[in-house]
Image (tube, helix red, strand yellow):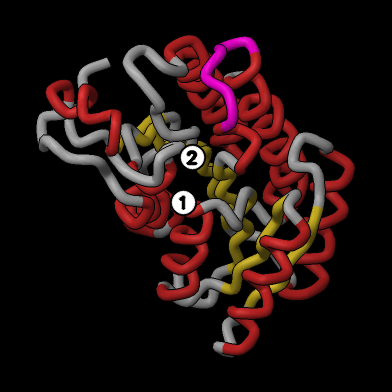
């Protein structure tokens, strides 16, 4: 979708940054949304030096009003928003306790998607992609991911008539997003992974890019696993 306009939330996480790079490399102008002011400033500064078509906005991704205002800024900047990729941010990965770890991502996904849908309905189309937090251990996020699947399927049916596609990416063990920045002590995870290795943020970004572009024009309501064949 050369010439398209995308927004990436959680844009300064390693996976979010990889998604930004993938979208820019495919010709998108990209709005970077994130709650970490310093990381966002650093990312925007580096991309500005490269001449990339980007703009950054610091906000709370679970605050629909803040997201809506930031999306309005993107529309004023580029005239439309074709894609919103909601990527798990830093806070989404801090805890492994389900009641703490799983809620923020779903809450912020609803806020971001709700704000984006208002714009996409007016322009008669768009693509929404949720990129869940990477798996941190066996059985991690099972409740959240089941809820996310139901949410994506239901929302896809609700907005499909407006030309809006809704999908999700479910990463497996992404080494550089893990607390020890690699497989490290999580080598016990490897026997459950068919490919026998950790994934990378770039591999998750490739799936998000596919779901953001014309190649997936007949794909909606789906959750794509990028897990190396990991057993749940």
Q: Does residue 125 appear anywhere in the picture? A: no
**Residue 163 vertical position relative to residue 221 in the rendered view, above or below:** below
C-alpha span from label 2 to label 1? 9 Å
Disc on res. 15: 1
Is 115 positioned to the left or the right of 113 in the image? Answer: right
- The front one of 161 and 97 is 97
- Residue 190: image x %, image y %? 17, 29
State which quadrant residue 197 falls in.
top left
Nearer-N-terminus badge (2/1): 1
Q: Residue 184: which numbered mark, if any?
A: none
Place of residue 52 in the rendered image (x, y in percent of width and height, measured from the top left): 57, 83
Label pair 2/1, CB-CB below 8 angstroms: yes
Provide the residue span drawn in magenta: 94-99
Label 2 crowd (10 A; few <14 / some 14-19 / many >=20): many
Q: Is residue 90 left or right of residue 118?
A: left
Which residue is at 55% across, 44% downward?
87
Where is mark 2, residue-wise?
Answer: 131
Is the N terminus in the top left, top right, bottom left or bottom right quadrant?
bottom left
Answer whether residue 185 is visible to the viewer in this image.
yes
Where the C terminus falls, by quadrant? top left
- Say whether residue 96 is magenta: yes
Majority SS type along the magenta span? loop
């Amino acid at each position: 979708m050369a010439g398209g306009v995308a927004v990436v939330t959680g844009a300064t996480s390693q996976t979010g940054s990889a998604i930004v790079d993938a979208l820019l490399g495919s010709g998108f102008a990209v709005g970077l949304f994130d709650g970490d002011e310093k990381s966002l400033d650093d990312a925007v500064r580096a991309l500005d030096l490269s001449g990339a078509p980007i703009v950054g906005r610091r906000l709370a991704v679970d605050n629909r009003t803040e997201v809506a205002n930031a999306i309005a800024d993107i529309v004023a900047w580029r005239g439309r928003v074709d894609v919103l990729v909601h990527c798990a941010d830093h806070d989404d990965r801090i805890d492994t306790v389900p009641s703490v770890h799983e809620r923020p991502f779903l809450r912020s996904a609803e806020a971001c998607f709700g704000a984006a849908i208002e714009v996409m309905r007016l322009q008669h189309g768009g693509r929404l992609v949720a990129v869940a937090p990477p798996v941190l251990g066996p059985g991690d996020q099972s409740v959240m991911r089941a809820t996310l699947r139901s949410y994506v399927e239901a929302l896809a049916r609700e907005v499909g008539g407006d030309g809006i596609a809704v999908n999700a990416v479910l990463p497996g063990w992404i080494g550089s997003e893990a607390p020890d920045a690699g497989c490290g002590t999580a080598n016990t995870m490897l026997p459950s992974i068919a490919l026998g290795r950790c994934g990378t943020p770039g591999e998750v970004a490739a799936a998000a890019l596919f779901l953001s572009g014309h190649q997936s024009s007949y794909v909606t309501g789906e959750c794509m696993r990028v897990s190396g064949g990991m057993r749940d």
